[in-house]
Amino acid sequence: MPDFELSEDYQDLSDTVREFADQVVAPVSAKHDEEHSFPYEVVSQMADMGLFGLPFPEEVGGMGGDYFALALALEQLGRVDQSVAITLEAGVSLGAMPIHRFGNEAQKQEWLPLLASGKALAGFGLTEPEAGSDAGGTKTTARLESVGDAKNWVINGNKAFITNSGTDITKLVTVTAVTGQEERPDGSIKKEISTILVPTNTPGFTAEKAYNKVGWNASDTHPLTLDNVRVPEANLLGTRGRGYANFLSILDEGRIAIAALAVGAAQGCVDQSVKYAKERSAFGQNIGKYQAIAFKIARMEARAHTARLAYYDAAARMLAGKPFKTQAAIAKMIAGEAAMDNARDATQVFGGYGFINEFTVARHYRDSKILEVGEGTTEVQLMLIARELGL
């Protein structure tokens, strides 16, 4: 029979990150949320713990772990602060992982030690103002320009909703761009989309004013402008024309990570509600003794448990080298909905206090909605699942 118990190493990691989340992250979460400030001191401590290097080999400065280790860390961080969790998730699975998966040796040696150390962050420049779920609609362009014996990519376009793109430690954004096109036999045009590494200090690269978001207020998110940005031809990441396909595979993996984060949020709502229901009295007894409250929290626990099993399954398939696209889509959808549903119910359990931002459940209520949108909307996940069913 399958064994869903964590090994000693995995459990030790989970416990360590849980303690860090409770003792270091949670006490400053409300402050950073209110100020819309990036938690540099927390990120620095996460870097010292090696969290940004969890799934990368030791030879590039990583911890020699795997993607499931990253997911466990994200779950524990997501319990108390989704902004901190998404900073780690985007920095690793979206920022550094494309270089690990598709970079050549020179690119890996240049960037992975820095990114795995957590001393620098990278962004994932896929989404555009008019290309979200339909990311194949990319309008950003890159053309090769010869200057003497050298060739440079000249990039022009705009990106939207890019996480970790404007911090003081952001050093790189990998962008998708149209590098050519070809005419199909039916007369339609097929875009050639490639991915290119753009250091953030490159002239013409601008992280515009940060978004004023509903939630994830301590996470760094900007629109980007690329105005005649010139980078060497060698900054092409992977094979020319494979950029879109490669980024889609990165998103498949990322959905496991986002599912883990969402499970953490869902579980955080359970934990906070149980604690509050045991302390809060109404009509002569603790509210947890009332069946209406007890059953509500019981359903919340069932959602978190089910979503956790879903992402465990997807991660196990991924690590075993088996197809996992559909399972990742299921996990992401189930976990995102569990987080949103649990946040709504936790807010109800807390009553008026659930509407006060100093309380964790109030922040989860604002933060969790994006878990049904980011890295693939619920509708995109349903589309992927339906395709697998042959519909």
Image (cartoon, helix red, strand yellow):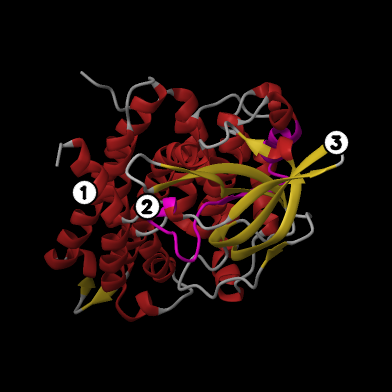
Q: Secondary structure at mark 3?
A: loop
* Percent position of residue 109, x then y: 74, 28
Q: Is residue 5 magenta?
A: no
Q: Quadrant of the C terminus?
A: top left
**Frontmost residue, 231 versus 352:** 231
Amino acid beneath label 2: Gly
Residue that numbered label 2 is attached to: 376
Amino acid beneath label 1: Ala
Q: Within 10 Å of the Cα at label 3, are there few (<14), some (14-19), or many (20+) other Cα atoms?
A: few
Can residue 12 be seen at all in this image of the molecule?
yes
* Percent position of residue 135, x then y: 43, 53
Q: Nearer the viewer, mark 2 or mark 1?
A: 2
Q: Residue at x 37, y 68 (%)?
A: 365
Q: Which residues are magenta?
A: 110-136
C-alpha separation, residue under disc 2 versus residue under disc 1: 24 Å
Residue that numbered label 3 is attached to: 149
Identify the mark at residue 302; answer none if there is no mark: 1
Residue 155 in the figure: left or right of residue 300: right
Q: Residue at x 31, y 62 (%)?
A: 340
